[in-house]
Amino acid sequence: MLKPLWLVRPRPDGGCDYVSFQFSAVSGSPLTGCVEMREGSHLPPQMPLLKRRHRLNPDEAERCRVRLEQEGGFHFSDPLF
């Protein structure tokens, strides 16, 4: 299984918005899998808030990642939690 990819965008209140992409294989083959995209926010020390969850094919997930980085102000991050 591939490691999750995290993107974050800082907010003025000290928290951040995050998007994580988690690859999940279907039928044991990574080539037939999908990507679960989780969107949320986090303001420590509070628990993270999950806002949306989507399942995308790998091509859609890559287009979404590029758009978030180029237009949304997100950047790569180590996992937040």
Image (cartoon, rainbow, N blue to C red):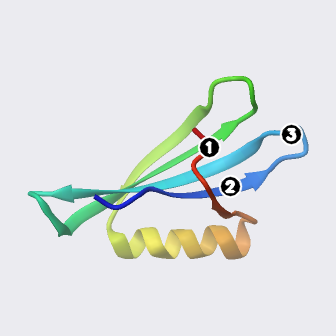
- Residue 70 lies, in percent from the top left, at 70, 76
6 relative position to 8: left or right: left
Q: Which residue is mark 1?
A: 80
Marks 2 and 3 close (CB-CB < 8 Å): no
| Residue at 34 percent of width and 61 percent of height | 2
* Residue 8 disc label: 2
Relative vertical location of residue 53 with respect to residue 76 in this rendering, above or below: above
74 relative position to 29: left or right: right
Marks 1 and 2 close (CB-CB < 8 Å): yes
The kind of residue on which mark 1 rests is: Leu
| Residue at 41 percent of width and 50 percent of height | 54
Q: Which residue is mark 3?
A: 14
Q: Secondary structure at mark 2?
A: strand
- Residue 20 lies, in percent from the top left, at 52, 53
| Residue at 16 percent of width and 57 percent of height | 26
| Residue at 46 percent of width and 74 percent of height | 62
The kind of residue on which mark 2 rests is: Val
The kind of residue on which mark 3 rests is: Gly
Quarter placement of the C terminus:
top right
Chain-order first, disc 2 or disc 3: 2
